[in-house]
Image: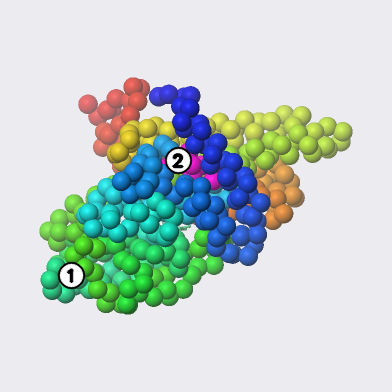
Amino acid sequence: MEFTETEDRSTLRKYARDLAERELAPRATHWDEAEEFPQEAWDALKSAGLFGVTVGEDYGGMGMADVEAAIVLEELARADVSSAILAQLIFNGPPRAIEHLGNQALKDRWLPMAASGEGLFCIGITEPDAGSAANLMRSHLTDDGGGGYRLNAYKNYVTGGHKASACLVWTRFPGGDGAKGVGAVVVDLTAPGVSIAGTHKKMGLRACTEAELAFDDVRIEADDVLLAGNPIDTEAFKTLLAHLNHERCGNAAMCLGAAQGALEYAIRYMNERIIGGRPLADLQGLQWKIADMATQLDAARLLLTRAVTMAGPHGTPPALETAMAKAASNLAAKFVCDEAIQLLGGYGYSREYPVERAYRDIRGLCIGAGTVEVQRNYIGTNLLRGRTPAGGAWRNPLV
Ligand SMILES: Cc1cc2nc3c(=O)[nH]c(=O)nc-3n(C[C@H](O)[C@H](O)[C@H](O)COP(=O)(O)OP(=O)(O)OC[C@H]3O[C@@H](n4cnc5c(N)ncnc54)[C@H](O)[C@@H]3O)c2cc1C
């Protein structure tokens, strides 16, 4: 693994960081307090050309990989996670799935819009009675003749669903049962039969909320099918689950960015805050907190670097390494942001200081894109079956 960032990646990081500090950081508290969509962040990302990071060059993007996506997301989230999520939805959401798995008509229709930032995309997997167990979804398609379908679905917790142009909907194809026959279609959210049933009031990520979307007999053309589910197997469902590894790595990157911002804020604060004639930075008990925070954060960052590096220029991050990176980044961010609040004392608990917002924001990331528990299930069961993550130190303990 290479630990020095290439010049190109370092330039990209600086570009994203400068934009985040200039356009996002000064407005993040207002967006959070007002629960207002971060339109200025959207406009700034669009005019900086940053929405095109992972979209292919044929469609107006830069065709970069998960490594670059993680760099940009980390830097944006350092200033404001709600704004970073807008980029995450394009870098690692439906456009990425369309480019990797979709037909030419889907690519021509949606990818230029994604790269230019003309439209937002959202993903509808979760339902009121099917979250971690997505295979229990009720959403289904019925044949409508001529290769088309009718979609009936109620999707819950769709990030940005009230603002998006299109939604990637996971649904069961005719004849399927459980995970068998689950595939995905891309739905134009202006289509007849689509409605926004509500939006959620949340603890954090308040500028980029989640919507409930109802699909009532929505016509789906054959070209709108991203991946058809075959009622006799679970292959399409497995492909969709594997493709979520892009989103999980993006989620991990945002956690690291937000926690990095909180850690740096705490370090500055400890050097400025004088108690009994000495800065907080002089107190050994607090120095140990900083040591633990930085160590956990960098350990998680190394796991993420492994997962995104293994994806290569055009691939998908591997499942086991991604699950480890996501769980570690979620937990490290929770620990770091919590300790940052503690280090600032009463001010840390105040909404006038940014560390409590970072904590509230990353808390949601520990649930979205597969909860920490679901990642642990995957890691634990795979290790116990003899699968090993990449790295020379590991060998299969069962042989
Ligand atoms: C900020 C945020 C953004 C989101 N964005 C989207 C989105 O854009 N699109 C979308 O489709 N969904 C989205 N979600 C929904 C998210 O994917 C689900 O909330 C998540 O999968 C958990 O499902 P659930 O809420 O139904 O909880 P449940 O599945 O009911 O789980 C409840 C608790 O039980 C645990 N649990 C469940 N099963 C197991 C098990 N087998 N072993 C151990 N523990 C278990 C869970 O980890 C959790 O702690 C988002 C959620 C959040 C918070």
Is residue 255 visible to the viewer in this orientation of the structure?
A: no
Mark closer to the chain start, 1 or 2: 2
Magenta residue check for 71: yes
Is residue 273 shown to the viewer in this render?
Answer: yes
What residue type is disc 1 on? Gly
Give the left or right position of residue 248, taking residue 173 as reference: right
Tell me, for residue 70, which label it has, or none.
2
Magenta region, residue range: 69-76
Q: Quarter of the image holding residue 229? A: bottom left
Q: Give the residue at x 69% y 31%.
A: 287
Judging from the image, what secondary structure is the residue with disc 2 in? Answer: helix
- The residue labelled by disc 1 is 148
The C terminus lies in quadrant: top left
The quarter in which the N terminus is drawn is: top left
What amino acid does circle 2 point to? Ala
Q: Is mark 2 within 8 Å of ligand 1?
A: no
